[in-house]
């Protein structure tokens, strides 16, 4: 089941899967609790298996209302089952209903194919985020 969740609920998966076990209290993003930001989670029974965060954040050079996708991750035991795809498609439908024009993200190099399969385009050269690894900026027009 997919539900809207709190920023606090994202922190355990962010810590274990995106930040190499960094203390969960240090795994918040600037803007997590801003008006317009939201978080979604995929639950299997009561276990949170996948998360994504969306910040209302336009990207320079792109007209209209934009959201930045951040911190999307699925628990490794459940990857490859379409959970992340369902979570992202739920969010796209929600954002489209809110009048959002596009989503953009800084995708880890190893996740680019996942985003491309959903329709995102690569819009930057590869760059390094210190302590995290190689990334590419990606963009999806949704309305």
Image: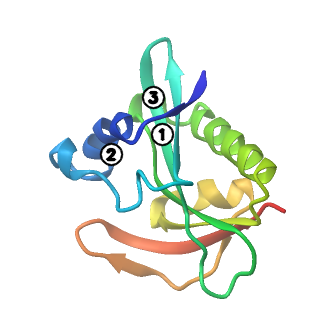
Disc 2 element: helix
Please give the residue where the numbered disc 1 appears in the rendered image.
51
User: Percent x, y for residue 47?
Assistant: 41, 19
Residue 51 at x, y percent in the picture? 48, 39
Please report contact status of discs 1 and 2: CB closer than 8 Å, yes or no. Answer: yes
| Sequence-earlier tag: 1 or 2 | 2
**Of 141 and 8, the residue lying toward us:** 8
Q: What element carries label 1?
A: strand
Q: CA separation, marks 3 and 2?
A: 11 Å
Q: Which of the 4 image quarters holds residue 131?
A: bottom left
Q: Which of the pair 23/122 is nearer the observer? A: 23
Is residue 15 shown left or right of residue 118?
Answer: left
Disc 3/disc 1 C-alpha distance (Å): 7 Å
**Badge 1: few (under 14), some or many (20 or more) residues near its Cα, within 10 Å?**
many
Residue drawn at 66 percent across, 70 percent down? 139
Q: How far apart are marks 1 and 2 (CA)?
A: 9 Å
Q: According to the image, label 3 marks what residue?
A: 49
Q: Mark 2 points at which residue?
A: 14
């Amino acid at each position: 089941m997919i539900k809207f969740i709190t920023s606090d609920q994202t922190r355990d998966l962010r810590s274990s899967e995106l930040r190499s076990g960094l203390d969960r209290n240090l795994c918040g993003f600037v803007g997590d609790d801003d008006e317009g930001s939201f978080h979604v989670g995929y639950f299997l029974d009561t276990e949170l298996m996948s998360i994504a965060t969306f910040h209302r954040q336009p990207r320079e050079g792109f007209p209209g209302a934009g959201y930045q996708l951040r911190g999307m991750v699925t628990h490794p035991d459940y990857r490859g089952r379409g959970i992340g795809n369902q979570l992202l498609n739920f969010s796209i439908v929600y954002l489209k209903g809110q009048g959002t024009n596009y989503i953009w993200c800084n995708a880890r190099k190893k996740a680019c194919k996942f985003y491309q399969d959903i329709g995102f385009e690569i819009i930057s050269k590869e760059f390094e985020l210190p302590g995290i690894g190689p990334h590419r900026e990606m963009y999806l027009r949704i309305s």
